[in-house]
Amino acid sequence: MVGADNTLYEVGGIGFNKKGEVILEPIYQTIIDFKNGYFVIEDNKWYIIDNKEFVKSETNYHTLRRLAHNFYEISVLVSKTHNTYSGKFEEKKKYGILDEYGKVILEPKYDLIGEFSAHQNDLCFANYTLNGSLGVIDNRYNLITEPIYSYISSFKDGTAFAIKNDLYQNQKGFINTQGEFQDIATIGSLRTIKSHVSKVEELSNGYTIWQLNNFESTKLCAVVNIQEDIVCSFKYHKIQLLSNGSYLVLKDRNYELVDKDFNLIVKFSFNAVVNTITIIDGVFIVSK
């Protein structure tokens, strides 16, 4: 029996109304009611039947699955191939979303759509994937960003760390809840992103070094003053303060020497680990 409002009773594949009248013939494998009609399976495909004219939709779906808050995940079958190693058939599907009225709000063209749990009633976010690139949706399945990212972290305090894909030169920055992207080099204060970073060192000149809390390849460091203003943006993997106030920094697997204002002095021609730099009479002695 299906239907909390006594709108539909299903017995043996036959759909009855509350008066006992047959409204769906016994040709469907499954009948599920929703606000505007019924989802039915015929020949292993999902169709929609409206509850006014009882007309079956021409559009069909490969799978249908109910989600939290009365949304439905749908899929269309793109391809089906036989894996000779496992002996099983592998299906490639594209996913979309229907609302509680059966209206398509996300066309079934996405590789993956993140799911929200039933207790997530407040504004929250999940990722979706299109052709290998990531975007962000809210808990009503509205697109917050275009799918132009190769990496998006979880949202914390209204922001998420993100890396754009190759078409955007892997630009790094933060996305806010409106989907606006800010390049990491333009962020002037640590306060706006503090939930995404950790302090790693206090320097003798009063500055501190902070590091992004993401996977290893993007654990970039920045230098921050006592007011939590960023004096050197997140662009180095390692920062070492030297005795004369200059810095030894590691960038893109190469070491550089920068002055106290982080202007380049010299870029070393080797990329091996620098153990120490000794300053004698203004001359930098590098030990590898």
Image (spheres, helix red, strand yellow):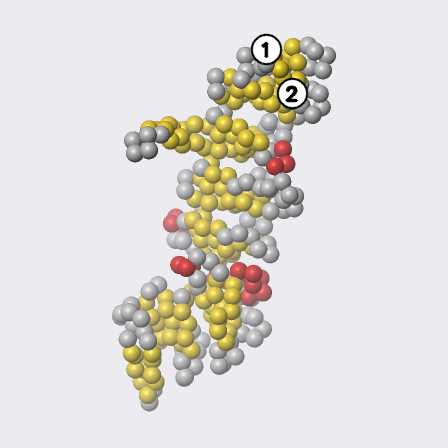
Corner quadrant of residue 248: bottom left
Under mark 1, the amino acid is Glu
Q: Secondary structure at mark 1?
A: loop
C-alpha separation, residue under disc 1 versus residue under disc 2:
15 Å
> Which residue, given by chain and number where applicable, does mark 1 sit on?
25
The residue depicted at 64 percent of the width and 12 percent of the height is 23
> Which residue, given by chain and number where applicable, does mark 2 sit on?
1
Q: Farthest residue in the left direction?
A: 269
Left or right? Give the position of 73 relative to 7.
left
The residue depicted at 58 percent of the width and 50 percent of the height is 177
Q: Nearer the viewer, residue 27 or 179?
A: 27
Corner quadrant of residue 104: top right
Q: Nearer the viewer, residue 265 or 220?
A: 220
The residue depicted at 30 percent of the width and 79 percent of the height is 286
Under mark 2, the amino acid is Met
Q: Where is residue 6 shown, x and y percent of the image?
A: 71, 20
Q: Farthest residue in the bottom direction?
A: 281
Q: Where is residue 230 shown, x and y percent of the image?
A: 52, 69
Disc number for residue 262: none
- Which image quadrant: the N terminus? top right
Left or right? Give the position of 227 relative to 150.
right
Q: Is residue 223 visible?
A: no
